[in-house]
Image (cartoon, helix red, strand yellow):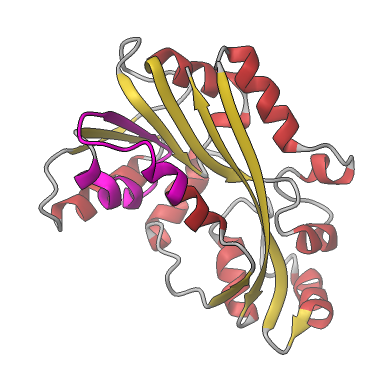
Amino acid sequence: MTTDFWDGVASRIGYDFSSVKIKKAGLDPEKEFFKDLEKILDKDKIVIDIGTADGQLPLMIANRVKRIVAVDISKIMIKKAVENLGRTNVGNVRFEVADARHLPFPDKSFDVAISRRGPVTSNTDFLGEVYRILKSGGEFVEITIGERDKENIKKIFGRGQNYEYLIENRREIARKKRMLEDVGFEKTELKEIDCVEYYETMEDLIFLLENTPIIPDFDTKKDRSRIEEIRDSLSTAMGIRTNSHRIIIYARK
């Protein structure tokens, strides 16, 4: 998605989805990601968070590490992150505007690189930069979007994030593993988690679609018929039923 898209999200909501009412059934991928992340954090490590949005992640883990630099391409997101930092007593986090394809840091600067639904494994331009800035033995942890995420919704729209992989039955996890190995990571571990989600109301789901890249160019007026089809075909007693497909990645340089 473009910088303008994320600037718009930042202007509207920061990156705050706490108002969305949702229930999950099955293993929660976000909790699994944090379990994996916690295993490699310690007070001696210098960390970079790539695609930080409004800075929630680095502020959550700041007390576990020596120092964190967090970057995002959106100036407005970084402004929100700095505002969030100002409401804390955290002193070891710094936020910067940066394009993750051209990170403004020397080779071998960081012990750990993190990407929480950021851009890193979308292509080798991003991933190669992560490899460059990691020290020898440095570690990379990411949670990213799988091709089957919101599968029933994307099929109704006939478009969506990674939609071409979904309809062609190509697996993102295999593509990402090849990229990691091609870039030079020696140890890679990837796992998929697919859990059921229930959005309490259509308004909750629409809020999500308006502020994420799940459905490109989503428009409540132009997509009205599709919204009605979702309401008619995906409504259950527990809410609007869909799914969350995530890939969790660990790699070591």
Which residue is more in the foreground, 85 or 194? Answer: 194
Most distant residue in the front direction: 39
Q: In which quarter of the image is residue 212?
A: bottom right
Q: Is residue 116 above or below residue 250?
A: below
* Residue extending farthest bottom: 237
Taking the image as shown, residue 226 lies to the left or right of residue 138, namely right
Where the N terminus falls, by quadrant?
top right
**Residue 162: x %, y % from top left:** 73, 43
**Residue 251 in view:** yes
- Whether residue 228 appears in magenta in the rendering, the answer is no
The image position of residue 92, as x and y in percent, is: 15, 38
60 is within the stretch colored magenta: yes
Query: In the figure, 134 relative to 48: above or below?
Result: above
Residue interval drawn in magenta: 35-64
Residue at position x 33%, y 18% in the image: 104
Q: Where is residue 108 in the image (x, y as percent from the top left)?
A: 34, 12
The answer to whether residue 80 is visible is no
Provide residue 107's location: percent of width, then percent of height: 35, 9
**Which residue is at 74% across, 50% downward?**
160
Q: Which of 98 and 117 is in front in this view?
A: 117
Q: Which residue is drawn at 70% across and 63% down?
A: 243
Displayed quadrant of residue 183: top right
Lateral position of residue 213 relative to residue 56, left or right: right
Nearer the observer, 252 or 4: 252
Q: In this view, does 138 lie above or below 225?
A: above
Q: Left or right: 212 with respect to 108?
A: right
Quadrant of the rendered image containing residue 84: bottom left
